[in-house]
Amino acid sequence: MARRCFVGHAPVDAWPADDRGLAYGDGLFETMRAHRGDLPWWTAHWARLARGAERLRLPLPEAGRVREAARALLDGKGGVLKLLVTRGQGGRGYAPPAEAVPAWQLSLHALPPPAPPAGLALRWCRTRLSTQPLLAGLKHCNRLEQVLARMEWEEDGIDPSHVQEGLMQGIDGEVVCATAANLFVCRDGHWLTPGVERSGVAGTCRAWAMRVLDARVARLQVADVETAESVFLCNAVRGILPVARLGARGWAPDTPSQRRVVDLRARLAAEHPAFEMEMS
Amino acid sequence: MARRCFVGHAPVDAWPADDRGLAYGDGLFETMRAHRGDLPWWTAHWARLARGAERLRLPLPEAGRVREAARALLDGKGGVLKLLVTRGQGGRGYAPPAEAVPAWQLSLHALPPPAPPAGLALRWCRTRLSTQPLLAGLKHCNRLEQVLARMEWEEDGIDPSHVQEGLMQGIDGEVVCATAANLFVCRDGHWLTPGVERSGVAGTCRAWAMRVLDARVARLQVADVETAESVFLCNAVRGILPVARLGARGWAPDTPSQRRVVDLRARLAAEHPAFEMEMS
């Protein structure tokens, strides 16, 4: 697994041990699908990173320098490219330094195992997402809630090859997302997805799917998901992920709304050949 | 500033760039007052770290090895010793590895500037703390809320030497703590402190002060603090910190309850000579 680290625009051999990303999770990240040395959704990823950086008032390296380093690291290959940017070193405890110099790294990872052809099996996570409007929507590095949710598989003796993802509710019980993907449900022929103003991440693939499906933001309860005509997950690495099962509830693959999910995957693959491999 | 890094029990020259502490804030820390090469509250700090590690199911290095490394780093000196422990490397995204090997570091820092002799000046922070019972009380590394709160000084043009700390409310409006200290208020002659079951940190100095003052946990609104007979903050680095002012509200130093805060400081200094230096 290849990795490159930088402080400001200078390559460094080692990550600084007094980095604020490590101390406080004071940073942002993007996990991007790479294909033949390129990053098909680079513009959307950088735009989200820039929105997060504005909210956290975190200085970013120059986009051109990052993309150049990404191309060099990819060297024509594909996979998953992770970009992590932190506020770097310094400051007085929680107070950031007046002039922060960002630290950043790029790392190239193998693609996750392909989704089952019939669709994902999901469970409900017990871990709930806290409400924090100041951080909601951002892909920041405070991810202990997701780590706790993912630890439930081990705690409950669930085989991750049998149940691949879990849905998370907010503290108030509303459904927010999966541990590492956004959620769409079809009800009365309309596509709905939870808002990301109080918790959750504003996914790049979510934005794409919302445009294509003309989906609406809606508050969803557990029963709204379980009684939906169809459900899918999406993220920028795995694209559109049909769902076959959620606990005891199953969705047959041959309904009109399930076929729309398959069509959506095909459309994504046509727009971005990176996602062809995920097609069953 | 001296620092030592370890993976498992082996010293390492550099912090691993793929550490889960950096990626997700998947770690815990303790900030300890060091005095003449020793850590007076070591037992309480390690106990809290162990409680956090149990909650996060994060393996810890052996306490004896950490304390030995701390003594070597301190080398008879005093100051602030920070211990950071993360879940180390590995895992599949948010899912931790089955057998994590913790990474940890010790770093020695100068004491913060002494508090003003008349007491601290406080403000109300706009940033609110989210409710997350699974993480509340722990000194974990997801600290973006505290970073955002501390950034308000710069945003609002507040001189940190004029207003030294800020009080934070939870999402629901209840008062929780300061950005880096616990809060006690005296009402009707009784000492009260907010609970840490929904947000906040179960401070080691808070536990000491609760015992000594026979303080009660109470839900406090903004008005309960502003109309209190006396207010103080505390943490394990700075001990007991009398408060002179909160926004427009001032507390005279010569009231009976303010004198009890001064007495509490004296008692702490008698029990732990490390805190003598903070006496005005």
Image: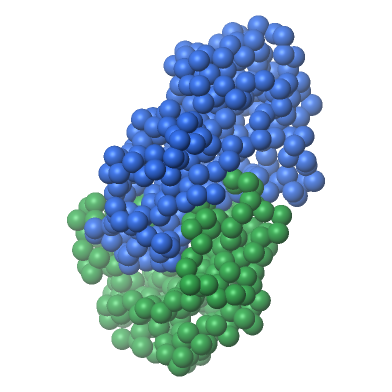
Chain colours: A blue, B green
Q: Nearer the viewer, residue B172 or A53?
A: A53
Instruction: Give coordinates of residue A54: x percent, y percent.
Output: 30, 42
Asked if residue A121 can be seen in this view, the reply is yes
Residue at far front of view: A76
Place of residue B71 in the rendered image (x, y in percent of width and height, measured from the top left): 52, 87
**Percent from the top left, x then y, of residue A223?**
68, 24
Q: Report the quarter where the C terminus of chain B lies.
A: bottom left
**Looking at the image, which residue is at 51% across and 62% down?**
B16
A124 horizontally vs A142: left or right = right
**B50 relative to A29, above or below:** below
Q: How many marks?
A: 0
- Residue under the point 61% across and 65% down: B102
Residue A255: give x, y in percent of width and height: 70, 8
B50 with respect to B145 (left or right): right
- A45 displayed left or right of A121: left
Q: Quadrant of the N terminus of chain B?
A: bottom left
Give B176 or B110, whichever is nearer the viewer.
B110
Q: Is residue B165 visible?
A: no
* Residue B97 placement, left or right of A141: right
> Residue, x 48% and y 72% (percent of image)?
B13
The relative height of residue A174 versus residue B263 in the rendered view (above or below) is above
Occupied quadrant, residue A250: top right
User: Please, is residue A142 above or below residue B141 in the view?
Assistant: above
